[in-house]
Image: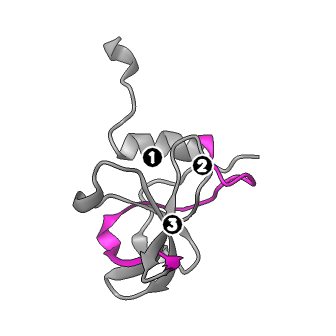
Amino acid sequence: MEREVIRNESRDTISEGMLVALSLVIYRERLLIGRVDKLKDQTLKITWLHGHWTTSWSVCKRREGQRHIEWQEEVPKAAVVLFDFQLTQSGKLRQATVRELKRVYGLEQDEDSS
């Protein structure tokens, strides 16, 4: 059974381990999803995930010298547009999550404009 997406929930309920979707100007051309690793007052330390609307999501790696490490970054809590959602067993976004993300990113089609 697919859980519905909860809207307008306070960001104060974000906790470590949750998945979050973000809207950041420096990455505005892509869907941004991360896992919360650490909470501070106004920021979150996240591990970035990579994937797309219909593909599986996995931890994003970056190169540090000759090693590949998880790409972690500190981001403002205010950049979170959706949180506490889950991926399917195959690592994909659930349909309710996709619909809500497209709505908050302004990508949904207006059915009246056809």
- Identify the residue at image location x=51%, y=46%: 52
Q: Earlier in the sequence, mark 3 or mark 1?
A: 3
Q: Which residue is mark 3?
A: 60
Separation of residues labelled 3 and 2 (CA atoms) = 16 Å
Q: Earlier in the sequence, mark 3 or mark 2?
A: 3
Q: Would you say residue 73 sits in the magenta stretch?
A: yes
Near mark 1 (Cα within 10 A), the count class, few <14, some 14-19 or many ≥20, is: many
Residue closer to the observer: 23 or 49: 49
Instruction: Check disc 1 and report its element: helix, strand or loop.
Output: helix
Q: Point out the stretch of residues depicted in magenta.
A: 67-95
Tell me the kind of residue under disc 2.
Answer: Leu
Furthest residue toward front? 66
Disc 3 vs disc 1: which is toward the camera? Answer: 3
Q: Which residue is mark 2?
A: 93
Disc 2 vs disc 1: which is toward the camera? Answer: 2
Separation of residues labelled 3 and 1 (CA atoms) = 20 Å
Q: Which residue is mark 1?
A: 101
Q: Is residue 12 above or below residue 3?
A: below
Relative to 61, 114 lies left or right: left
